[in-house]
Image: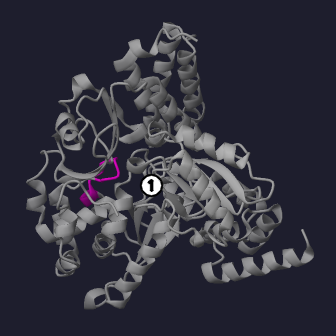
Amino acid sequence: MLVTEQERLRDDIASWAQDIGSDRSALIPILQEIQGKYGHISDFAMQIVADKLGIHPVEVYSVVSFYSFLEFKPAGRFVIRLCRTIACDMLGKDKVATQLENDLGIEFGETTPDGKFTLEWANCMGMCDQGPALLVNDRVFTRVTPDKVTQILEACRKAFGIYALGSIGEGHL
Amino acid sequence: MISSHTEPLTFSTIAPNAGLKAALSMKRSDLIAEITNSQLKGRGGAGFPTGVKWNLAAAAQADRKFVVCNADEGEPGTFKDRVILTEHADLVFEGMTIGGYAIGAKEGIVYLRAEYTYLRKHLEQVLADRRAKGLLGKNVCGHDGFDFDIHIHMGAGAYICGEETALIESLEGHRGEPRNRPPFPVDTGFLGRPTIVNNVETFAWVTAILVKGSQWFKSHGTARSTGFKIFSVSGDCDKPGIYEFPMGITVSTLLEAVGGLGAKAVQIGGASGHCVPAAEFERTIAYEDVATGGSIMVFGPDRDMLRVAHNFLEFFVEESCGQCTPCRDGNPKILECIEMLDHGVCSSKYLQEICELGETMQVSSKCGLGQSSPNAFLSIVKHFRNELMGRGL
């Protein structure tokens, strides 16, 4: 990690601690900010957070390892989480999963070499009546079919940010 | 945007802030008595009487108290809280404010699951509007000395955090591992202060009860399960989605309404609930018979029940927090047994042993997750034994 990058991380964490607080209950919100901006929580980040909150880095590690939305490994710019629970399973999540793997050339739990996409499983995401469902970062897509997978990935590749995704397969809340 | 199949929902007939104004005009003890009289029970699934919970928290002495809304809706097949938060967020925040007044709390927290991050913007907007209207903040609704505000705390992806003590651990910045009880959260909750943790739907019903009265609520449902319930219906039926029914409805009546007649089984209560076979469709959905937090999953005649059990156990193996042995080690043993059944290499004797292990988990696990995770497997084995056994490779 470059020194400038370390400085940036240190400054960011200081400013989040300023906004959110530096007691123990601020730990997860601060980690979520780091995850959101940097795509993962590095050893260095955990050390800085631990110093800031006055706890042992192992405490921070134990929390990061517990929650599935906090990651040690750098994730892609678009994290795709496909629901694998029974309702989506019955509606054909296996075909969607296969198509995602084929189109991205990676398996679940992996990130594409260009750092754009990470493929993950998710447990029930509350879209059981409109499955198969998947999340792309914070956005939900419902009634996903194998051909829609191609469209979603294409829209991600073209997009500057997740909110530029247009209306392709937009989720119905 | 999804609406319910049973129109109109009671929630859409409730006048805004009528419940809150009614509550603020009452003495705290009368307010709690009204909730107690309605016999409202927790709508998240556990079914603890809301009035009793609030009464205990109100009686506790402390410098700070907290009202926590459990929006960590993670039970497979449940999505009613998502719909309530999308369409009736005001009712939920109103219910939380009423709770704050009842127990003497100034701070409310919504624990929103990470998978629902896309709802946050909408909820923050509703909260901002309520602050602007004086419905949150200092002297709520002009009621002198009653200050109350709500903030949203995001979850980070853990099913177990729907368990109230695990949720509190998570709020405090720890791993979401359930606590030993007692002490109970009403006495020693968030930051060691008295805390009520209620489900999204429970808060919305509190508001409805204050508008329409506890007698109205009690006149629906059964003697031990009063009022209405929102159901999330999915699986093999014509009209999956959100439904409102009185408690005590039979499974067959519900199936008729959702277009699921001819089903071979219905999973009631999500992965941690029970599998009800066609022969028992006259059973009622109520706390005294088959309880549910709202999840109804319909399995058509062609569904492989072993695949269903496999999916549920994969879920529990992943979501067990790993703190206590029965749950951490028991769930993988059940999953292994399901895989043996699938490969046709499980003896009757071994299946019997695994069922006994499941029963041991039900009594020896620390929290509701491990106590209920064997339910689906055990009920599928009980009712579909012939379908599971004697499979070829």
Residue occupying the point 28% across, 71% down: B91
**Magenta span of residues:** B42-52
Classify mark 1: helix, strand or loop: helix
Q: In this view, does A133 lie above or below A76?
A: above
Q: Is residue B261 above or below residue B78?
A: above
Q: Looking at this view, is A156 or B35 the one in front?
A: A156
Rendered location of residue B327, percent (x, y): 54, 35
Q: Name the residue under label 1.
A: B164
Q: Does the magenta stretch include residue B48?
A: yes
Residue occupying the point 45% across, 16% down: B388
Going by the image, does B120 lie left or right of B143? right
Residue occupying the point 50% across, 57% down: A141
Q: Looking at numbered disc 1 in the image, what kind of residue is underneath it?
A: Glu
Residue A5 visible at all: yes
The image quadrant that residue B26 belongs to is bottom left
Q: Does the magenta stretch include residue B19?
A: no
Going by the image, does B262 lie left or right of A57? left
The image quadrant that residue A60 belongs to is bottom right
